[in-house]
Image: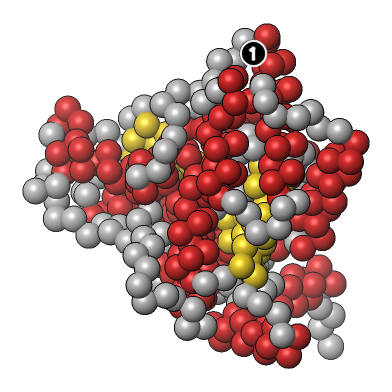
Amino acid sequence: MTRIPPLFLRARLQAQAARLLSQPGLLALRHRVREGRRLLANRPHEIQVFLRIDDPYSYLLVQILADFQQHYGVSVRCFTVLELQDDMYPEPALWHSNAFKDAGYLAGLYGLDYPSQALPDSQQQRQLRAMRRLQASAQLLLLERRGQPDWQAVEKVFRAYWYDDTRVLDGYPLLNHDLNEHLRRNEQRLQQLGHYLSATLYYEGEWYWGLDRLDHLQQRLRDLGLQQADSTLMEFDRTWRDFCCHPVADIPSAENQPLVLYFSARSPYSHLGLEQMLQLAQHYRQPLMIKPVLPMLMRGLKVPALKKWYIFADTQREARKRGIAYGYVADPLGAGVERCYSLFAWAQQQGKAADYLLSFSRAVNSEGVLAETDSGMRFIVQRAGLNWLDAKAILQRDDWRTHWQDWAEANRQEMISYGLWGVPSMRYGELAVWGQDRIFVIERALRDAGAVE
């Protein structure tokens, strides 16, 4: 009797568990169970929202919450948070710098107020802003204690902070011991409920981050029959609603720059980004360069379990919305990623880079294929139209684990040079954005370059 290696068995069981957890009807079943529990407990429809004064996504969110609350007839409880969990943000300076620019794209898309430039960043200004941050947070906590939020008052605090309105900010209290304890309880609540980001909404067991995920919450509330007939709240689907829907003409040769995708073979969001960037490149008849980088865990960084499970659940929702297969995940961490990258330059030389990475990404994210095995890699390679015997010879080289590391690190450094730190990141010329949710920015640049008839 053949003995199954324990690591292989564990990987196979994990893939099957992921497959079960991502069944299409499971989320709907969870929603029905939570609604049943809510009815039995006679609880109102209540959304908990976690806001942070120096989070630009929180500033956007507070501008629509009054209309959102009225439109669906729900109760909204506000919880002010301030300190982030360090292990959730591997590059905090880059994250904050990009967040200001990134939130600006959303503000323009939805017609929301937003400052045209970031606050000054001198040492003196940073010290003053640190004090303003505490004062504004204290004011938010005082408003929070009144019960049902006064969204106009909350928005006034955010606006004063983001526009550095010292006349208003100087009238706010300092963060005393009592308010600080209140703040710590809010931050513990966020973590205990299962999240790590601000600008998040929690409703009956499910999380929704900022404007980008409000469409999922809107659909859930509509399914419960909560939409008010006389309300005109906008739909928060503009980042993806018109994706690749515009007729195209040739882009002038002077503007004919390749699209660039910074990609990780282990990242669920990279899987979504790859599928969409390939569609974008095909639709606009533009070349796509894919630049793989090493996953965080393989660079000595940590991804806490809380973050990992949220990303898995969120990717399921987003993939389903966009018609992309995802869920039967066979984590390629370690040998699977190494084997993928070991063959990338070879596939690229044969003009098959995109076909190869797409075959790999689909295999490990939606088909449960174990990339650390020869049978798994043979399937991936052959489906991409490549020769397995040639690929196997490369994987048997003494340096198969290392010969690709220099270019993978060079790709990461190039990505960082554009102010980005994580994957997927996309670039068109000098325009660089982070996250598959911002592909609409790249598409808009293509249209502006003359691609739309």
Residue at the spot 35% in from the left edge and 56% down from the top edge: 238
Location of residue 207 with respect to 219 vertically, above or below: above
Q: Can residue 61 be spotted in the picture?
A: yes
Looking at the image, what colour scheme do you see?
secondary structure
Q: What's the residue type where badge 1 is placed?
A: Gln
Residue at the spot 48% in from the left edge and 62% down from the top edge: 68
Location of residue 47 with respect to 189 vertically, above or below: below
Residue at the spot 28% in from the left edge and 59% down from the top edge: 242
Residue designated by label 1: 125
Residue 396 in the image: state x and y as whole percent.
Answer: 65, 52
Q: Can residue 15 be spotted in the picture?
A: no
Identify the element where label 1 is drawn. helix
Residue 244 in the image: state x and y as whole percent.
Answer: 26, 57
Residue 178 in the image: state x and y as whole percent.
Answer: 89, 41
Q: Quadrant of residue 156?
A: top right
The residue nearer to you, when weighing 204 against 8, is 204
The residue nearer to you, when weighing 286 against 118, is 118
The residue nearer to you, when weighing 110 against 256, is 110
Residue 398 in the image: state x and y as whole percent.
Answer: 69, 43
Taking 303 as reference, is 254 left or right? Answer: left
Placement of the N terminus among the 4 image quadrants: bottom right
Location of residue 309 with respect to 115 vertically, above or below: below
Residue at the spot 81% in from the left edge and 44% down from the top edge: 183
Q: Quadrant of residue 290?
A: top left
- Count of labels shown? 1
Location of residue 85 with respect to 188 vertically, above or below: above
Taking 427 as reference, is 98 left or right? Answer: right
Taking 109 as reference, is 216 left or right? Answer: right
The residue nearer to you, when weighing 250 against 10, is 250
Q: Mark 1 Cα within 10 Å, few/some/many (few <14, many 20+)? A: few
